[in-house]
Image: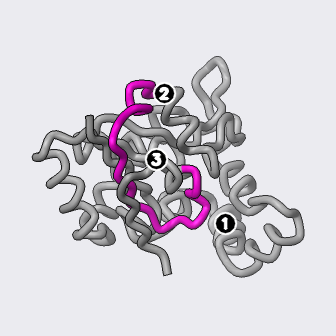
């Protein structure tokens, strides 16, 4: 079996999709201004000082109280626009060609699950792993990350899709942290700078 694994942010869609998605949501003026600061150099400095992705944690807090339905619908709108305006045509074409040749195609992204689901639906991919959000019993986002796949993509893929363990793997990514995917790939396309 042949499997192609593609990253999303900067690889298939040429932007940070979590940032782009959150920027597309109708937040209050306060949250719009706060989130803009978190996506700026100030957020990068906060990350360095905290020793973790503090800005991302704070951005995700903006989703507190949103229903899964609202997040899914807004992710579909965002992905439709992003695929029309900021898609990497060579990567998209490589994925479609691999599909025509019988490969299974998986998205492995640290972006948020509603975004990954929308991409998988739009391109008819075989599956995905993504950062999952926490929801309360009523289906409202708590504003917290339940499971972050950053730097843990291969293990998460194998847990979710065990059949890929013995597959011939091709990877497309711009992410230098995807070393776990690089180690298992027969063909590794690094698209970073």
Q: Which residue is mark 1?
A: 35
Q: Position of residue 135 (x, y in %)?
A: 63, 28
Picture quadrant where residue 56 is located: bottom right
Q: How would you rate the neighbour count of disc 3 (Cα within 10 Å): few for under 14, some for 14-19, many for 20 or more?
A: many
The residue drawn where x is 73% and y is 63% is 55
Q: How would you rate the neighbour count of disc 2 (Cα within 10 Å): few for under 14, some for 14-19, many for 20 or more?
A: few
Q: Which residue is mark 2?
A: 160
Q: Earlier in the sequence, mark 1 or mark 2?
A: 1
Question: Observer-nearest residue: 122 or 156?
Answer: 156
Q: Tell me if 34 is positioned left or right of 8 in this view.
A: right
Q: How would you rate the neighbour count of disc 1 (Cα within 10 Å): few for under 14, some for 14-19, many for 20 or more?
A: many
Q: Does 131 sit above or below residue 26?
A: above
Q: Tell me if 58 is positioned left or right of 39 in this view.
A: right
**Label 2 SS:** helix
Q: Which residue is mark 3?
A: 108
Range of magenta residues: 160-180
Q: Position of residue 54 (x, y in %)?
A: 78, 59
Q: Tell me if 4 is positioned left or right of 69 in this view.
A: left
Q: Position of residue 96 (x, y in %)?
A: 17, 53
The residue drawn where x is 70% and y is 35% is 142
Question: Observer-nearest residue: 33 or 55?
Answer: 55
The residue drawn where x is 61% and y is 37% is 133
The residue drawn where x is 38% and y is 48% is 5
């Amino acid at each position: 079996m042949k499997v192609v694994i593609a990253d999303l942010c900067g690889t298939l869609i040429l932007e940070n999709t979590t940032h782009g998605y959150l920027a597309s949501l109708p937040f209050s003026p306060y949250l719009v201004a706060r989130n803009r600061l978190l996506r700026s150099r100030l957020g990068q400095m906060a990350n360095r000082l905290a020793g973790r992705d503090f800005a991302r944690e704070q951005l995700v807090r903006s989703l507190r109280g949103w229903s899964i339905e609202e997040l899914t619908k807004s992710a579909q709108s965002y992905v439709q626009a992003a695929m029309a305006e900021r898609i990497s045509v060579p990567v998209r074409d490589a994925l479609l060609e691999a599909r025509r040749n019988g490969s299974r195609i998986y998205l492995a992204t640290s972006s948020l699950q509603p975004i990954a689901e929308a991409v998988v639906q739009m391109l008819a991919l075989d599956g995905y792993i993504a950062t999952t959000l926490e929801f309360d019993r009523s289906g409202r986002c708590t504003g917290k990350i339940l499971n972050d796949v950053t730097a843990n993509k291969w293990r998460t893929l194998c847990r979710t899709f065990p059949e890929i363990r013995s597959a011939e793997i091709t990877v497309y990514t711009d992410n230098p942290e995807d070393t776990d995917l690089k180690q298992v790939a027969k063909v590794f396309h690094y698209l970073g700078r």
